């Protein structure tokens, strides 16, 4: 089981917009990834699952995956969570 | 879900909207009507939606403003607006919008509670098909 633990950097935590970017990235990896926050966990590709974790900025979450591509997928997703995705907002406009 | 976030006057169960933008404007107006947001917030909701869809699954979208529009939030609040005929939401079929106005992290637990409800198919259906304000209040405030 590959694992990465990372503190969520987005100013607003893992809510609608950062959560959506994360879920889209998780789907793109093609690897089933689980995201865990405290005692709760959810499939990384489920928007509702990720939202239900209620992650605020600075919360440590653990990403887990198995099998081929797991390490690369977790690296990609952990790097995304370590970025302030709200700060990128102006760049999208 | 926190008390006072949902004003029964911000629960609208028989709305219709020609498109996604109209649905978002309806949500924005509902939030403005209960004094939760200033008028410019509605445009910020449209801007946010153009940046990324607020569709979350289960026929539900959660339109809200950009981070830059937080000054137009007068108090944390949500509205529940139902579109029985549905609205095309960038290819998804939306029948329920939960519009959100939140200043700080106040809305993260709120979203988590909403997501929790929607992950339960029975409660999600009850919410989507609610025809009485009291049903919605019961689902979202207990």
Image (cartoon, helix red, strand yellow):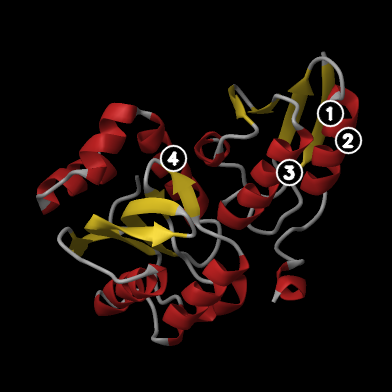
Q: In the image, is B4 to the left or to the right of B9?
A: right
In space, the residues marked 1 and 4 are separated at their CA atoms by: 25 Å
- The subunit carrying tag 4 is B
- Residue identifier under label 1: A4
Could you tell me if residue B8 is visible in this image? no
Closer to the N terminus: mark 1 or mark 3? 1
Residue A75 — which label? Answer: 2
**Residue B93 position within the rendered picture, expressed as x and y whole percent measured from the top left:** 37, 51
Q: Residue at x 69, y 59 (%)?
A: A11
Q: Where is residue A86? Give x, y as percent.
A: 70, 63
Camera-nearest residue between A22 and B89: B89
- The residue lying at 17 percent from left, 58 percent from top is B13
Residue drawn at point x = 47 percent, y = 82 percent: B43
State how far apart marks 3 and 4 are (Cα): 20 Å
Are discs 4 and 2 located on one and the same chain? no
Q: Secondary structure at mark 4?
A: helix
Q: Nearer the viewer, mark 1 or mark 2?
A: 2
When the figure is inspected, residue A59 is found, relative to residue A11, above or below; the finding is above
Label 4: how many residues lie within 10 Å, few (<14), some (14-19) or many (20+)? many
- In the rendered image, which residue does mark 3 sit on? A25
Q: For residue A66, what is the image quadrant?
A: top right
Q: Which residue is mark 4?
A: B115
Q: Name the N-terminal-most of marks 2 and 3.
A: 3
Do the residues indicated by labels 1 and 2 lie within the same chain of the protein?
A: yes
Please say if the residues under marks 1 and 2 sit with CB atoms less than 8 Å apart.
yes
Q: Nearer the viewer, mark 3 or mark 4?
A: 3
- C-alpha separation, residue under disc 2 versus residue under disc 3: 11 Å
Dot 1: within a 10 Å radius of its alpha carbon, few (fewer than 14), some, or many (20 or more) residues? some
Q: Residue furthest bottom?
A: B39
């Amino acid at each position: 089981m590959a694992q990465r633990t990372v503190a969520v950097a987005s100013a607003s935590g893992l809510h609608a917009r950062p959560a959506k970017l994360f879920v889209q990235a998780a789907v793109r990896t093609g690897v089933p990834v689980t995201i865990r926050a405290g005692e709760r966990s959810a499939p990384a590709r489920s928007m509702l699952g990720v939202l239900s974790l209620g992650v605020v900025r600075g919360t440590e979450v653990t990403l887990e995956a198995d099998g081929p591509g797991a390490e690369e997928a977790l690296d990609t997703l952990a790097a995304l969570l370590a970025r302030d995705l709200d700060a990128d907002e102006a760049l999208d406009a | 879900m926190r008390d006072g976030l949902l004003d029964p006057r911000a629960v609208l169960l028989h709305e219709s909207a020609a498109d996604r933008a109209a649905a978002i404007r309806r949500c924005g107006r509902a939030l403005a009507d209960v004094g939760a947001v200033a008028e410019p917030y509605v445009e910020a909701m449209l801007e946010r939606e153009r940046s990324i869809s607020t569709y979350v699954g289960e026929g539900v979208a959660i339109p809200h403003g950009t981070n830059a529009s937080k000054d137009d939030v007068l108090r944390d609040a949500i509205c529940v607006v139902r579109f029985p005929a549905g609205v095309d939401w960038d290819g998804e079929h939306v029948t329920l919008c939960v519009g959100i106005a939140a200043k700080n992290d106040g809305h993260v637990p709120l979203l988590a509670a909403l997501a929790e409800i929607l992950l339960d198919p029975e409660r999600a259906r009850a919410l989507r098909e609610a025809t009485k304000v009291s049903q919605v209040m019961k689902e979202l405030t207990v």
